[in-house]
Amino acid sequence: MTLVHHGHAGSFRFQAGGFLATRPDLHAMLLSGLGTIEQLRAEGEVPPTVLGWWREPDETATTAAFVWMPPHTSLITP
C-alpha cells in the first residue's frame, strides 16, 4: 500500500473525497472533521492537521483515508 499524508485539506478532498463520498454513511465523522478543518481555515485559523489516504501500489483509486486534528482522536475509514 502507498500512504500519502500532509496537512492540505484541498489536496486531501481532491485525492480522497470521491472515495469518502461513495459511502457517506461509513465516513460521516471523517467528512465532518474535514469540513471543520476547511471551515476553520476559511475563517483564518490554521488548526494542526494530519490528513492521509492509502492506495494499492500502481493504483490511482484511494482505498482508505484518515483525518487527525490533535488533540482529538484520529478518524480512519474501515
Image (cartoon, rainbow, N blue to C red):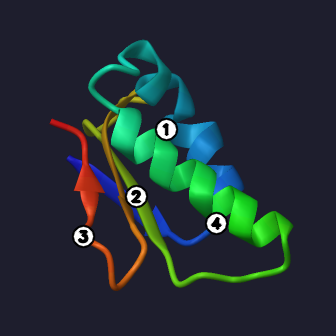
The residue identified by callout 1 is 16
Q: Secondary structure at mark 4?
A: loop
Q: Secondary structure at mark 3?
A: loop
* Residue 59, image x, y percentages: 37, 29
- For image coordinates 84% across by 71% down, the residue present is 43
Q: Name the quadrant of the C terminus.
A: top left
50 vs 52: above or below: below
47 vs 61: above or below: below
Rendering quarter of residue 62: top left
Q: Give the Cα separation between the discs numbered 4 and 2.
A: 10 Å
Q: Give the Cα separation between the discs numbered 1 and 4.
A: 12 Å
42 vs 29: above or below: below
* Residue 33, image x, y percentages: 47, 54
Mark number for residue 33? Answer: none
- For image coordinates 65% across by 52% down, the residue present is 11
Q: Secondary structure at mark 2?
A: strand
Q: Give the Cα separation between the discs numbered 3 and 2.
A: 14 Å
Q: Determine the residue located farthest toward the top in the rendered image.
A: 22
* Sequence order check, earlier mark of 4 and 2: 4
* Sequence order check, earlier mark of 1 and 4: 4
* Sequence order check, earlier mark of 1 and 2: 1
Mark number for residue 73? Answer: 3
* Sequence order check, earlier mark of 3 and 2: 2
What amino acid does circle 2 point to?
Gly
Left or right placement of residue 10 versus residue 3 in this view: right
Q: Residues within 10 Å of mark 2 (few under 14, many from 20)?
A: many
Q: Give the Cα separation between the discs numbered 1 and 2.
A: 8 Å
What amino acid does circle 1 point to?
Ala
Mark number for residue 8? Answer: 4
Mark number for residue 52? Answer: 2
